[in-house]
Image (cartoon, rainbow, N blue to C red):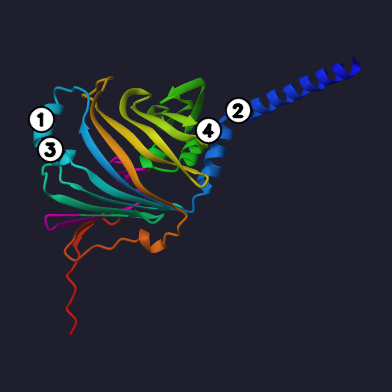
Amino acid sequence: MKTRTKLITMSLMILCIALLTSSTANAGDSLQDIISAVSTSESAIDDIKIEYTCIRKPYGADPNWQPSANERYPGWWKQETGTWQQKGDKIRLDRTYYKTTSATTQVEESTTYDGTGTKHSESFAEILNGLVTAGRWHGFRKWFNPVLALSATGDTKLGSELANMNAEIQEGSYTINRVSCKLVKLYKKTPKGTILRSFNVYLDPSSNYAPIKVEEYWNNFQCLERTVEVKELTKVGDVYVPTKAICITYNRPHASQTSNAVTQQELTTTNIKVNQGISDSAFELSFAPGTKVWDDTIAIKYIVPELEPEP
């Protein structure tokens, strides 16, 4: 009888320990725990290269925008291809797409950030344009590309966003595509305390808190501006990389507190390389002869001279 009592007692102790261990394993939902998990995952990436395609189509029913857009902007609906590269703070985005108003005129675009400043070049129909600006240019997040599926704002890494922006964890579990997620509200305030840029970020604890969905709002979580939803994640080493994502953009009538969904973009990753050793030279960009360059750092416009022929 004593032996049986001991066995029952030991079984209860083991069960309690198992429950406590499970509770501890699933309790990593504090903001600091999430930041630590995300930062650890990101620190495993020395460099990353993602090749992708992106296709747009009309979405929703905004009568003031959609019907005319199909006819006036045929290039907008043609597939683009791109390559996103990152090494530390250095980044590069190369895109090939069609001019918005033409279904036949291709545009080649490259944008690099070397940790200090940005260079941007575009060429189409023998027209060459360039831009030089200080800091990281907003153009990296202007069009849908992998950075918007890897972070919330598209300006920095997710770990940095969680640590440096105002962040609040919402109680409860939120299901996105049958994935149980944690919801973090991210926002930035003006010096006067007004909330402008604001985001709902849904993170998957089972994938090192990879973002599954991001809702971007105008003005204090009012009026949707853009949603990005990750449909597929692929694990590369210890890193979860989005391989399929959907972006929906919204049009906001002037001073309105509501917005209308107008465009859906589907991004599909065609190739991923992590920690393959990207050279620093990949983040250097030089302008071809004849390029019209606006240097915003010194407010000067110039044309890159033609090369002198060798004697």
Query: The residue tagged with tag 3: helix, strand or loop?
Result: loop
Residue 42 appears in the picture as rendered: yes
Quick one: label 4 or label 2, which is nearer the N terminus? 2
Residue at x 54% of width, y 37% of height: 35
Q: Say if 216 sits above or below 138 in the image.
A: above
Which residue reaches farthest top? Answer: 1
The amino acid type found where label 3 is placed reads: Tyr
Q: CA distance from mark 1 to mark 2?
A: 51 Å
Where is mark 3, residue-wise? 73
The amino acid type found where label 2 is placed reads: Asn
Q: Which mark is residue 68?
A: 1
Label 3 or label 2, whichever lies nearer to me, is 2
User: Does the segment drawn in magenta span residue 112?
Assistant: no
Label 1 or label 2, whichever lies nearer to me, is 2
Q: Which mark is residue 206?
A: 4
Where is mark 2, residue-wise? 26
Q: Position of residue 267 (x, y in %)?
A: 31, 39
- Left or right of 248, for residue 161: right
Q: Are marks 3 and 4 in contact (CB under 8 Å)?
A: no
- Left or right of 31, for residue 236: left
- Left or right of 250, for residue 153: right
Quick one: label 1 or label 4, which is nearer the N terminus? 1
